[in-house]
Each structure stands twice: as structure tokens, then as C-alpha cells.
Amino acid sequence: MSTASSFPDSSLGGGNSGANLADILERVLDKGIVIAGDIRINLLDIELLTIKLRLIVASVDKAKEMGIDWWEHDPALSSGARSKELARENAELRERLEALESAGETGAREQIDSARKKETRDE
């Protein structure tokens, strides 16, 4: 019984197709490729929906070279961006809390005083 592959050397069964695929993938990632398309849905010449599709396939280095680095600033994808987003949100909430406390300080004091007066009357 032979242990050789039962597939002949062809584009489906083996040969150097793996090397060809690797070469193609390397070229695509090195140079980058853009696929663009639009889908429009019209009814009686009235545009109901437009979907614009843009796909860029490139290596991270090539994308950065082209000025594309959105994944570094997306909190869902980058822990550094998530930390920055949380710090910004925390600072914003602290400012809002200080503003509310300073605005409500006089109102809160008046409410405490009126509650104390009511307790005193009820006793």
C-alpha cells in the first residue's frame, strides 16, 4: 500500500499551490488592495437606501503608512484607547459632579434646614 497522496499535482490537490497562495497573500499585504462598491435601493426614482462598502486589505505597517490607524484609537479594540476613554469620561463626570454640588449646595442646605424645622414642629 502506498502512502503517497492520491491527489495529482494540480491547482486543487497540492503541488506548489500553497507557495503560490503565500506569495499572493504577501503581495496583497505588502501593497494593499481596495475593494469599493455602492448599493442603492430606489423605488419610483426615490432613493430609499444607500450603502457604501469600502474594504481595504493590507498589513498593519502598510495601513499605518497610508495613515490608517483607527484600531489604535477604538476603545473596543485597544486597551490603551480604552484607558484614555475611561480617564476622559472620569474627568468629565468629576467636573459635572462638582458643578452639581456647587449649584445644589445652597438648595440642599435649605432642604436640610426645612426638614429640621419640620422635625422640631412634629415633636
Image (tube, rainbow, N blue to C red):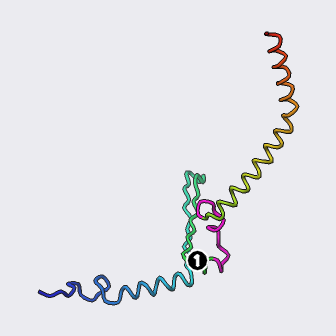
Where residue 32 appears, as percent x and y from the top left, is: 56, 80
Q: Is residue 123 left or right of residue 56?
A: right
Q: Is residue 93 above or below residue 7?
A: above
User: Of the residues shown, which amino acid type is indicated by label 1?
Assistant: Val
The residue under the point 58% across, 63% down is 77
Magenta stretch, residue numbers? 64-77
The residue under the point 35% across, 90% down is 16
Quarter occupied by residue 69: bottom right
Quarter occupied by residue 3: bottom left
Where residue 57 appears, as percent x and y from the top left, is: 54, 75
Q: Nearer the viewer, residue 18 or 73?
A: 73
Per the image, the residue denoted by label 1 is: 60
Magenta highlight: main SS: loop
Figure quadrant of the N terminus: bottom left
Q: Is residue 8 left or right of residue 62?
A: left
Instruction: Answer few, some or many: residues within 10 Å of disc 1's Cα (few below 14, many 20 plus, some between 14 and 19).
Output: few
Residue 88 among magenta residues: no
The residue furthest left is: 1
Figure quadrant of the C terminus: top right
The residue under the point 81% across, 39% down is 100
Where residue 99 appears, as percent x and y from the top left, is: 83, 42
